[in-house]
Image (cartoon, coloured by chain):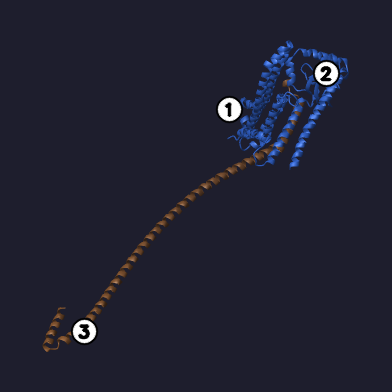
Amino acid sequence: MEIVSPGIGLILWMTLSFTALVFILRRYAWKPILKSLHDREDTIEEALNTANKAREEMKDLKADNEILLKEAQEERNIILREARKVKESIIEEAKYKANEEADNIVENAKERIEYEKMAAMTDLKNQIASISIEVAEKILEKELSKESKQEDYIKKLIGDAQLN
Amino acid sequence: MNSTSILKKFKTVFFVVILAAVMVLSAIITSADVFSQHHKTRQDEIELIKEEVTEGEVDAGKMINDHLIDSHEWHLWTYKGHHVAIPLPVFLIHNGEFHAFWSSKLAHGHHHKGFYIEVQGDNKGKILRTIQDDMLNDEILREEGTTDLPTDLSITKNVLAIMISSIFLILIFTSVARAYKRRKDQAPKGLQSFMEPIIVFVRDDIAKSSIGEKKYEKYMPFLLTVFFFIFLNNLMGIVPFFPGGANVTGNIAVTGVMALFTFLITSFSGNRGYWTHIINTPGVPWWLKFPLPLMPVVEIVGIFTKPFVLMIRLFANITAGHTIILGFISLIFIFGNINEFLGLGIGIGFSIPFAVFMSLLELLVAFIQAYVFTLLSALYFGMAVEEYH
């Protein structure tokens, strides 16, 4: 039964070779390999974490942007509304002013017309007075050669004048 | 950078070429040796004829056994009665004297300094020494038990196979380690990408899950070495020719040494809780411990059965696989002995397909046994360092 009886030589050589193999591989293979694997796993994990953080930040940034956008829109709306209001008020004012001006102009015109009319009337009256005096002179020259007639006439004239 | 890598590659190639040259050269030397010796004496010629006659009858059991056990030379092939083998150094200690010579001196029952390889009986395959120098060639006296057994520390076939596979492992994994340094923080490539999943598998699924996140690192070098050593030698055992073909993991001494390593590491890393569980198992009724210490005895036996089972499991699995394949192959010659065409038919129709099937199964077993040995070792380490509450 040699197959189940271990030989002393083989045990010795196997012990020596295997011990040497474990130590050589530990020093020159397993340690660097396991360290590299560990390092790489760390790097990957770190990269994933960074990516996650960046994504989170992006999300925050996006939310911020949306808020900003909303605010900007609101502001714009407010500005527009105000501008519209200002515009309307300006137009209103302008209309009001224009009306006032127009009224003023009309008033002035009326005053002017009145004045002109008065001036015209005065002028007319003066002219009428001078014409009347001329007429009176002429009549007087013609009619008032006799005393009686002079009197009658004066009376009649006065009467006419009173009627006017 | 580039020139140094080329230099390294050149070194590797150079090394392999030298190794191959040494092997071929030594093979030629032995065959020449054997050849010349065959024409020396008439007795040898008779022996040769005897051998050829007995070769006519196929002894499958003997053939299988010869393939499974260790040998003092690495037999390559036999052509027209000439054995071509790689001679291996023989180191013997006999009566406090150290002897060293090449195994080719002992080929075909030859004697050298009184040493010879026994071919029958309990010591079959071992090197014996005749007690009296003048009885060296006397077969009758040899058989009467006038021999004794020197301490055999030879570089046998299995020892050489262990050394070759160790060199392979060192070459492979230092090159992988270099790849990690050269391609820092990059995706693995080539051999590195082939080995990385296995290394990560051993680390995550064997070491981390059995020993625990905190303490697994200390045991990684042993676990990885044992895994790849068993795996590579299992695979090389399936290859039928040099440098494969040695039954390393199917040898009880080899598996025994590895199991001894597991035992020693487990025992030396055992913490207070581990030993308490063995000597004074908590949660067990007192009458199992006193006055008859039943539980402690069972537990202490358990310390030794665990590595013992590791040794037997690997040895038996590999030996069984090889035995079955060799059995299928023997069938060809058994039937061929009856009728040449019957042998051919059995070979093509039965033996080859089943041997191929068994070889495929052995590929699976090669991995599974490496995995099981490593996993169980890791579990034992895990038990030894577990924090008991």
Of the residues tagged 1 and 3, which is closer to the observer?
3
- The vertical placement of B383 against B43, above or below, is below
Chain in brown, by letter, is A
Label 2 – label 3 distance at C-alpha: 192 Å
What residue do we see at 79% from left, 19% from top? Answer: B78
Q: Which residue is mark 3?
A: A134
Give the label on residue B346, or none. Answer: none
- Give the drawing colour for chain B: blue
* Amino acid type at mark 3: Glu
Amino acid tagged 2: Gly
In which quadrant of the rendered image does the C terminus of chain B lie?
top right
Instruction: Out of A34 and A18, give the one closest to the viewer.
Output: A34
Residue under pointer 1: B286
Q: Which amino acid, mark 1?
A: Trp
Q: Position of residue A29 (x, y in %)?
A: 70, 37
> Label 1 neighbourhood size at 10 Å, few (<14), some (14-19), many (20+)?
some
B151, above or below B174, in the image: above
Element type where label 3 sits in the image: helix
